Amino acid sequence: MNFYPGPSKVYPQVMHYAQEAFASGILSLNHRSSTFMHLYESTTNALRQHLQIPANYWIAFVSSATECWEIVPQSWVQKKSLHIYNGSFGEKWAQNAQKILAYKGKEIEKNVFEANEILTYQKLADSIQVSKPDTICFIDNETSNGTMLSNEMMPALQKNFPEILFCTDATSSLAGRNLPIAHFDVVFASVQKCFGLPSGLGVLIYSPKALERAIEIDDKQHYNNVLSLHENAQKQQTTHTPNILGIYLLEKILQELPSIEKQSTLLQQRAKEYYTFFSHLGYTKPLIHTPEVRSDTVIVIEQSPNIVQKCKQEASKKGIILGNGYGKWKENTLRIANFPAIDQEEIQQLKDFFLFFSIFAEK
Ligand SMILES: *Cc1c(COP(=O)(O)O)cnc(C)c1O
């Protein structure tokens, strides 16, 4: 049982679909062939339908979220990018962007907030007035500390700052939470988290406004600039030989999934139960004490470092993989993926394990 927050458990049907992909011959087909183009089209249609992506938004396939960390500063920042985050993934994105923006002579500003803080419209608006960015980068769900943004402030931000591009890294939430994609200009994710698929494929979604900005900037210095991605996306193709197997699996899995509303309601319910469970266990507690900002998809619990060690050891004896802590929470936390591919039976076994572990923890 794998509760690592990515790569995590893949849907069991992946085995069957991987064999089917092999038998169909598509894995050896040219990625400029009509069969591939057909697959590309049906996969983007399925994504659009499942995630309720606005009809005028574009979808490109890339290799990973990390690649998108470079695509955004390359293709979309005019003069200044503002990164708003509270954890390690936000920090890493900002560091990646900083390198690219530095040699292009552009600026970056980092606005780091506390993990337990609720981001409000007013706070963001004030920070925009001061730093005057043209691009804002959020982390929808911070996988290192288990916090998520409410996104309630997005409609007002979009309305009052129409010149800004709003970008969000939704790697550990897309396909798990019902993200209002229309409230962002750029949304991206890899598929090894909430999509329940093998790693090695990323999805980049961008708005007409984002496309316009990229055309204005007209930077094609690197192969993975958005203009080249877009040129290919229009032909149902990719800039590079893509992960055809990954795209095939994505298309098949999307056909089977319950609606995003159902998936997100299920995860919300399970997350609530997890937080209640861990709040009452005694030897552990949720890392985040502001309920409003707790993630629905990555549950982070805090314990003393030696209990963390013992807990991982005992879990592994029972065939349970728990996620290590990450970044500054590496030693004193455990992370548990609450992704849709994990079923109720597995969650029950995990909870049983934590109840059983109480005897060790209290010694
Ligand atoms: C996992 C993760 C990434 C990195 O994904 P890759 O597929 O390794 O590029 C980026 N951002 C967030 C928020 C993540 O959770």
Image (tube, rainbow, N blue to C red):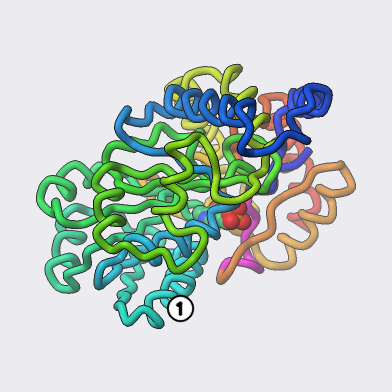
Which residues lie in the magenta part? Answer: 329-337
Q: In the image shown, does 120 or 168 lie closer to the viewer?
A: 168
Magenta residue check for 94 = no
Q: Quadrant of ligand 1?
A: bottom right
- The residue where tag 1 is placed is 99
The answer to whether residue 251 is left or right of residue 305 is left
The correct choice, above or below, for 222 with respect to 269 in the image is: below
Q: Position of residue 82 (x, y in %)?
A: 29, 67
- Assign the C terminus to one quadrant of the image: bottom right
Residue at (62% x, 60% y) in the render: 333
> Which residue is found at the position 68% from the left and 46% from the top?
199
Residue at point 72%, 49% (across, down): 322
Relative depth, front residue between 12 and 113: 12
In this rendered view, identify the residue nearer to me: 217 or 34: 34
- Regarding residue 279, the answer to whether it shows in the image is no
Whether residue 254 sits left or right of residue 99 in the image: it is: right
Q: Is residue 126 above or below residue 339?
A: below
- Say which quarter of the image contains residue 27: top right
Along the line of sight, the residue nearer the viewer: 176 or 211: 211
Residue 128 drawn at (x, y percent): 17, 65
Residue type at tag 1 = Lys
Q: For the residue labelled by badge 1, is the local secondary structure a helix, a strand or a loop? A: helix
Image x and y of residue 8, in percent: 69, 43
Residue at the image point whose x is 69% and y is 37% from the top? 30
Disc 1 C-beta below 8 A from ligand 1: no
Is residue 105 something that shows in the picture?
yes
Up-down relation of residue 240 to residue 178 (above or below):
below
As drawn, which residue projects farthest toward the right? 317
